[in-house]
């Protein structure tokens, strides 16, 4: 009888959670933004926000851009208020079917906890561990 050979899958490195503060300042380029419920961009009010870094990439025009998630519930509530426009996808029907579909998709995917920011505005809790989570 043949022996069944078993193999163990290689261990994947655990995903390192990089957290920190994003500073959003009025009158500067330091802004924390979200995608609103109809697909536009909305900026969060001035303040400091606790975030978990999800990913980052280099953009040759603007430098390193980051996507993160808000950690504190009150910040998520603020983002929900800022990102809720009061419009429905049906309000965009007059702009054509393609625009209507994009707006329906944006409404379905709306996540007020997902934030976008520049690396210069991010102060990691542990500076040595900063970078895209592995």
Image: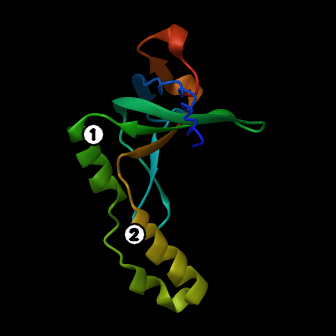
* Residue 23 picture location, percent across and down: 43, 27
Q: Which mark lies nearer to you, 2 or 1?
A: 2
Q: Is residue 113 left or right of residue 25?
A: left
Separation of residues labelled 2 and 1 (CA atoms): 21 Å
Q: Mark 2 or mark 1: name the one nearer the start of the chain.
A: 1
Q: Quadrant of the C terminus?
A: top right
- Residue for badge 2: 108
SS at badge 1: helix
Q: Is residue 127 above or below residue 86?
A: above
Q: Is residue 112 above or below residue 57?
A: below
Viewer can see residue 14? yes
Question: Which residue reaches farthest front?
Answer: 1
**Front-most of residues 81 and 73:** 73
Q: Is residue 85 above or below residue 33?
A: below
Q: Is residue 93 left or right of residue 57?
A: left
**Front-most of residues 27 and 48:** 48
The residue located at (41%, 80%) in the rendering is 89
Q: Is residue 32 left or right of residue 76?
A: right
The residue located at (57%, 43%) in the rendering is 1
Q: How many labels, in total?
A: 2
Q: Is residue 83 above or below residue 78?
A: below
* Residue 88 picture location, percent across and down: 36, 78
SS at badge 2: helix
């Amino acid at each position: 009888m043949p022996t069944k050979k078993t193999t163990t899958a290689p261990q994947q490195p655990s995903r390192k959670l990089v957290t920190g503060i994003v500073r959003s300042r009025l009158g500067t380029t330091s802004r924390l933004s979200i995608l609103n419920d109809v697909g536009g961009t909305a900026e969060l009010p001035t303040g400091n926000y606790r975030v978990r870094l999800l990913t980052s990439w280099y953009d040759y025009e603007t430098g390193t851009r980051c996507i993160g998630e808000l950690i504190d519930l009150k910040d998520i509530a603020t983002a929900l208020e800022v990102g809720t426009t009061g419009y429905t996808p049906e309000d965009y029907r007059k702009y054509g079917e393609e625009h209507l579909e994009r707006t329906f998709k944006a409404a379905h995917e709306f996540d007020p906890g997902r934030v976008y920011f520049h690396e210069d505005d991010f102060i990691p809790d542990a500076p040595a561990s900063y970078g895209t989570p592995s």
